[in-house]
């Protein structure tokens, strides 16, 4: 079970680097709280709770990568960014990581700042930037949203996984049995498969919500469309 523990476990990264990323995560989350006040309304608040619960569930799907108590799993950053936006989405993922670390022991408490940086901050930020870009290129139909969700999921997972490579380079203390380049390649290869799985789950979830209540999808509400032809209506579903 030690080798299958989710997230970065205690002792893999040294204390100073872990403390630095902990401070970075704290400042970033405080900024997310400040910005999220502008987004929260009667639709987004309950959706945030549902998104956090769903991410918590899918993160239980754990994929061991190599020995040394590091493993890969579904992140949920793209789903959060698509449904509740970057600020609330980062908070949702961070809350999941905190609960998992403190209650279930998934990831070291001392490494919490590292895990939040990789999954809640980098993962959600990369996903939302890709969503903004793709939704200005692809049609805002169910298929367009699905393609956006899939691509954003795959690439955000890949980039987030490389955050650990940077952190290990800065303060790795455990011999993982390979050089830095091999570590980056191993993580990228494993997380490419994980990202494809997450992309399918995210695309299916977003398409389902879009067909019933497109007004609940943050990305559709916040990004001004370039044209209206063939787009999903924002008034679907009974209130």
Image: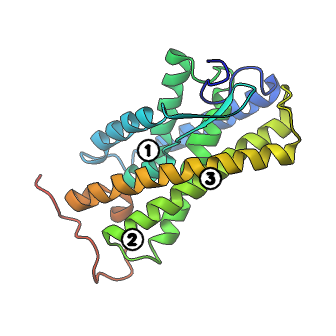
The answer to which of 238 and 221 lies nearer the viewer is: 238
Tell me residue 229's x, y (percent).
28, 84
Tell me residue 196's x, y (percent).
53, 54
The answer to which of 2 and 80 lies nearer the viewer is: 2
The answer to which of 165 and 181 lies nearer the viewer is: 181
Q: Secondary structure at mark 2?
A: helix
Residue behind mark 2: 144
> What residue is at 37 percent from the left and 41 percent from the top?
51
Tell me: residue 69, above or below residue 123. Answer: above
Determine the CA span between mark 1 and mark 2: 23 Å
Q: Nearer the viewer, mark 1 or mark 2?
A: 2
Q: Secondary structure at mark 1?
A: helix
Residue behind mark 3: 192
Q: Quadrant of residue 119?
A: top right
Mark 2 or mark 3: whose residue is earlier in sequence: 2
Q: Nearer the viewer, mark 2 or mark 3?
A: 3
Determine the CA span between mark 1 and mark 3: 26 Å
Tag 2 and tag 3, C-beta contact below 8 Å: no
Mark 1 or mark 3: whose residue is earlier in sequence: 1
Residue behind mark 1: 88
Mark 1 or mark 2: whose residue is earlier in sequence: 1
Q: Secondary structure at mark 3?
A: helix
Tell me residue 151's x, y (percent).
52, 62
Farthest-out residue, left: 238
């Amino acid at each position: 079970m030690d080798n299958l523990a989710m997230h970065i476990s205690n002792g893999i990264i040294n204390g100073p680097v872990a403390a630095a990323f902990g401070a970075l995560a704290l400042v970033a989350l405080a900024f997310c709280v400040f910005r999220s006040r502008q987004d929260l309304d009667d639709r987004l608040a309950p959706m945030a709770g549902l998104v956090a619960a769903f991410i918590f569930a899918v993160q239980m799907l754990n994929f061991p990568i190599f020995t040394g108590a590091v493993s890969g799993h579904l992140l949920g950053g793209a789903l959060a960014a698509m449904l509740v936006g970057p600020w609330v989405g980062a908070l949702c993922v961070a809350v999941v990581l905190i609960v998992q670390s403190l209650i279930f022991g998934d990831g070291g408490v001392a490494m919490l700042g590292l895990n939040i940086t990789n999954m809640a901050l980098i993962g959600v930020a990369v996903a939302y930037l890709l969503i903004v870009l793709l939704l200005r290129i692809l049609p805002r139909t169910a298929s367009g949203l699905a393609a956006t969700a899939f691509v954003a999921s795959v690439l955000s997972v890949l980039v987030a996984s490389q955050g650990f490579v940077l952190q290990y380079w800065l303060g790795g203390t455990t011999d993982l049995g390979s050089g830095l380049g091999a570590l980056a390649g191993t993580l990228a290869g494993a997380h490419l498969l994980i990202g494809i799985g997450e992309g399918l789950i995210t695309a299916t979830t977003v398409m389902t919500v879009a067909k019933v209540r497109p007004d609940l999808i943050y990305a559709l509400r916040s990004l001004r469309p370039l044209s209206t032809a063939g787009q999903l209506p924002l008034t679907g579903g009974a209130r």
